[in-house]
Image: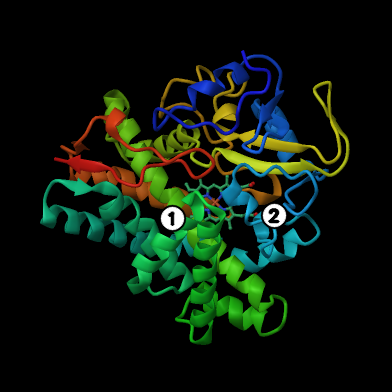
Amino acid sequence: MTEAPAFPQARTCPYEPPTGYDPLREGESLRRVTLFDGRQVWVVTKHAQARALLSDPRVSADRRRDGFPFISPRVANLRDRRPTLLSMDQPEHGPRRRMLIPEFTARRLKEMRPRIEQIVHDALDAMLTKGPPADLVADFSLPVPSLVICELLGVPYADHEFFQDASRRLIQSETSEETAAAADSLKDYFQALAAEPPPGMIARLIDDHLESGHLDADEFTSTAMLLLVAGHETTASVISLGVITLLDHPEQLAALRSGPQAAAGAVEELLRYLSIVDIMSRVAAEDIEIDGTVIRAGEGIVFGSSLANRDENAFAEPDSFDITRPATHHLSFGYGIHQCLGQNLARTELQIALPALFERIPALKLAVEVGELTLRGPATIQGVNELPVTW
Ligand code: HEM
């Protein structure tokens, strides 16, 4: 067994953690891993300790701090960019997050529900009219959350080819130059949009916060970028990988079909099982003792949600996929002050999209073997860029 295995590693199955993580699942809750640049940092392998550290104010998300663990050259390139909510600590974080909350309240979500249902059924109508085969990512998984977040933000969906491509390059480019070019193109796009914003959250942020000086132009564009990218690639991945997982577990798919009450449980279990945002990165701002281990100030800490979400102390038989289990305490939306702002929007989209897909296309199946799919590499949102299906 390697003393400090490489982290992150590539998956070989779309819904299972990398097999190279197996040795990390045994033993202590904090282990050493080696990042791409040869640095060794802590990885938190257990659920309780991950929750404790993610909500500990001595643990910083500020990527400009010495010792912050970058998990790829792509992410390292973002170091000197304007921090977004994701990389702010208190006291900066709270007021910034509060600016974004009005669009994510339970009331707003309830109002959005009929429109989300319509978006889902329109996408399915188009798929059925075109007939099999289809690329589920291009025809369903991506357009549904993309349209929802565009309408919420007030971004013209007509520009989707541009921003879907730029977001994908932002989260998947191999080189720093390509990542920077993708970020710059999105920044220019939002700067231009700000001159005459359509109705939506962007226009509201301009009226409420940009004009009054609570947000400057740079922070405004980085916030808009964060919302756009976070709002569609993530949910899209859960739809695509969720379909693969359900088709591979027919008895669970049958349980999902048993009625609307099954959908909420299925979505939580898929979120747990898939752990698509498999890495959160932090740095210790002070010495922290946990479980008999001392993390020194300036040491990097990474959290693998696929490790914590498969911790047998938190989930019985964690490697079995069971949509009836209680799974809501999974860490797939993170934990602590950075816990996902869009989690209830994502849940609503998934609870509508997955049952509707299997109801409208009951004979849906993959058009290739799971082993033939090209999986995204490590160090990004886990998923597939194409998913050939037929019926
Ligand atoms: C299934 C879909 C999604 C998953 C799995 C997911 C996952 C996550 C995770 C793990 C974090 C915390 C990262 C960290 O602590 O380092 C996060 C934060 C965030 N997410 Fe999501 N997300 C999803 C959908 C969305 C949607 C639809 C939006 C809507 C715009 C969104 C917006 C955000 C924002 C703004 C943050 C930063 C919150 C903060 O720092 O206070 N996410 N998400």
Residue nearer the viewer, 290 or 95: 290
Q: Residue at x 51, y 64 (%)?
A: 181
Say the numbered circle drawn on residue 168: 1
Q: CB of mark 1 within 8 Å of CB of mark 2?
A: no
Disc 1 versus disc 2: distance between alpha carbons? 20 Å
In this rendering, position of residue 124 left or right of residue 29: left
Q: Residue at x 70, y 22 (%)?
A: 29
Residue 16 coordinates in the image, percent (x, y): 44, 27
Question: Which residue is under mark 2?
Answer: 87
Count residues near mark 2 (Cα–Cα under 10 Å), then give few for <14, some for 14-19, many for 20+.
some
Residue nearer the viewer, 224 or 163: 163
For the residue marked with disc 1, what is the amino acid? Arg
Query: Does the beta carbon of the residue at mark 2 sit less than 8 Å from ligand 1?
Result: yes
For the residue marked with disc 2, what is the amino acid? Ser
Residue 335 coordinates in the image, percent (x, y): 65, 42
Count residues near mark 1 (Cα–Cα under 10 Å), then give few for <14, some for 14-19, many for 20+.
some
In the depicted structure, whether residue 294 falls above or below residue 56: above
On-image quarter of the N terminus = top right
Q: Tell me the mark number nearer the camera, choosing from 1 and 2.
A: 1
In this rendering, position of residue 37 left or right of residue 157: right
Say the numbered circle drawn on residue 131: none
Residue nearer the viewer, 357 or 240: 240
Looking at the rendered structure, the secondary structure element under dot 1 is helix
Q: Residue at x 56, y 23 (%)?
A: 21
Query: Does the beta carbon of the residue at mark 1 sit less than 8 Å from ligand 1?
Result: no
Q: Residue at x 26, y 29 (%)?
A: 254
In this rendering, position of residue 153 left or right of residue 249: right
Looking at the rendered structure, the secondary structure element under dot 2 is helix
